[in-house]
Every structure is written in structure tokens, then in C-alpha cells.
Amino acid sequence: MMEYKRITVNPISGAMGAEITDIDLTSGIDSETWIEIQDAWANYLVLIFRGQDLTDQQQFDFTQRFGKLIPHPYVKGIPEIPEIFKIIREPGESYSWDGFYHSDLMFLKKPPLGATLYAKECPPYGADTAFTNMYLAYETLSEGMKALLDGLEGENESGNPEKYSNKYQSMEELGKKGAMGAVHPLVRVHPVTGKKALFSSLAFTKRIKGMTDKESAPILSYLYEHSIQAHLGCRLEWEKGSLALWDNRVCLHHAVADYFGEVAKHRRVMQRATIEGEEPISIKKYEAMQAK
Ligand code: SIN
């Protein structure tokens, strides 16, 4: 890990996540600062930039530095920038589509590389986003389980797109019908760090390729319960003007639903910009690439 001279990096848990202060994302980022942000991101996986006063275009511009942005396949983007969509929950709503830990859009052939989430309106308490570090989830498995998973693939499915819109009353659906699916390795290798990470979530990974649902279920449930242990993750506390950046290749996340529905009734408005990814790399493919 490098010594940071341009940004202040304060870890928020032992497993992952850091707050970045002393930076104004609206005032241009010089090359040294950019190198430090990338290094901190690779080390902490989730960064939270506090006290930012961003326009939609500034969120777009900052996020786009990491790669091309893509619209959500089912949720309508904001009128001027379709790649940014709002995640709104009004008081009284009870349905959450981000209640399970997940990696975004795992059902795409090329799941996103990462995303930024910007807090526009926050409840007075709660409404954290919880993350888990999938490198650690992999590394803390037994050698027997690692050997079993090596070479296995998960079948990831979006399910009925209505779950993204109709039941989540304040979000605008795009009108696209039909479920999507993609098969990905259960263990993927990060193209930059070369480290192995679990890539499975009960939200989207419905079965293991070549196995029945019944055979897959105990393995996938175990991996999920193992991955989401509190000591493998962190929780981001939001305040208006915070911008989170996560590496979707090696994190699961979910919105902690403690501020609406049965429990409390507060409005929350976030907006997400999603960065295009590549096809996940299996261990076998990575080894073949290294051997060349
Ligand atoms: C998401 O799943 O991208 C949204 C997380 C959140 O609203 O906290």
C-alpha cells in the first residue's frame, strides 16, 4: 500500500472500506491524486468521499474516469443522463429490491466493474449500505471447499423484472420485459490484483451449472451465509453529500432496510452510476493467461 500524500484515507473496518477526506471531487483531480484514489480503491474495495456537492454531470464525470457507464437494464435513468438512476424509497413503502447482499447485475454477461452511489436525501438514522469482502470470503474457506469450487460455475438470473420496479413504487421502470441470465465462475480472478474472490449471491445465483436446484441449494446457501459474516465486511453510514465507490467484482452489498416499512418511515434518495465490466475470469482462464 502506498503512502497517501494527496488524500486522507481512514479505514472504517478491519475487513474493507475507507473514508476519503481532504478532497473536492468538483475541482479537478490531478494525476498524483488519481493514482492515490486508485490505490486506495484496490486496497479497501469501497471508498466513501464525504461532503461532496455534486451535480449529476459531476457524478457522471467522476464515475466515468473508471470506465464507460451503462444504464440499468430495467430502471429508467434520469432524463439528462440515462446512465444515472435514482434509488428512491418513500415513507410507507415496504418492498426492497436491494435487501439481499448482491453484486450488481450478476445476470449480465459482463457484470459491472463498479459503481458510485451518491446520497441526495438521507433518513435521520439508519439506511446504511452493508458490504462484504469477497476476497476474504474466498480466502477463509477450507482448502476442501476451495478445491470443490474450482471450475464450478453459477447460473445467475435476474428473475422477473417487475421486482425492480412495480413493487418498488417510487422508481420508474424502463418497460423492458423478460428475465436475463448469465453463467459465471463461482470463483473469479480480479484482472488487476490477480487475487481470487467468490462470485455468488443468493439474490441472483440460482444454481450451480450441471447440478439440480436441490443439489446446488445447500452449497450456495452455505457460501452466502459464509460471505455475509459481519467480520468480513463493513457498513457505510450515509449523510447527504457522501459518494460511495465500490468494486462490484469483489464486493457484495445491500441496503439495510431499517428506515421504512414496518420499522420507521423516512424518505431516502440515492443515485447510482454503474461502470461497465468485463466477463469474469475463472481461475483456469487466468492461469492460461499467465502461462502465455
Ligand atoms: C444498490 O443495491 O445498488 C443500492 C444500495 C443502497 O441503496 O444502499
Image: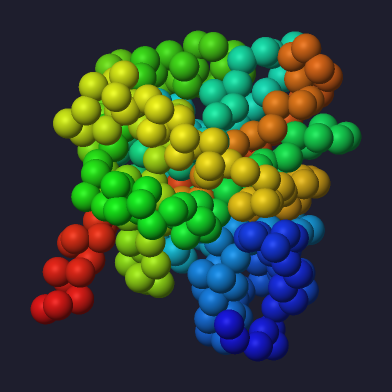
Q: Quadrant of the C terminus?
A: bottom left
Residue 275 visible at all = no
Q: Nearer the viewer, residue 85 or 239?
A: 239
Q: Residue 167, percent across and down? A: 54, 11
The answer to whether residue 283 is above or below residue 180 is below
What colouring method underlies this structural image? Answer: rainbow
Residue sticking out furthest to the front = 144
Q: In which quarter of the image is the N terminus?
A: bottom right
Q: Residue 245, percent across and down? A: 58, 56
Residue 282 visible at all = yes
Residue depicted at 70% across the width and 63% down the height: 14
Residue depicted at 31% across the width and 32% down the height: 156
Residue 122 lies left or right of residue 106; in this view the side is right
Residue sticking out furthest to the right = 124
Q: Residue 155, percent across and down? A: 27, 32
* Image label count: 0
The answer to whether residue 177 is above or below residue 276 is above
Residue 198 lies left or right of residue 124; in this view the side is left
Q: Nearer the viewer, residue 12 or 165?
A: 12
Residue 256 lies left or right of residue 266; in this view the side is left
Residue depicted at 21% across the width and 28% down the height: 211
Residue 175 lies left or right of residue 163; in this view the side is left
The answer to whether residue 17 is above or below residue 124 is below
Residue depicted at 43% across the width and 14% down the height: 162
Residue 19 falls in which quadrant of the image?
Answer: bottom right
Q: Residue 20, percent across and down? A: 71, 67
Residue sticking out furthest to the left = 292
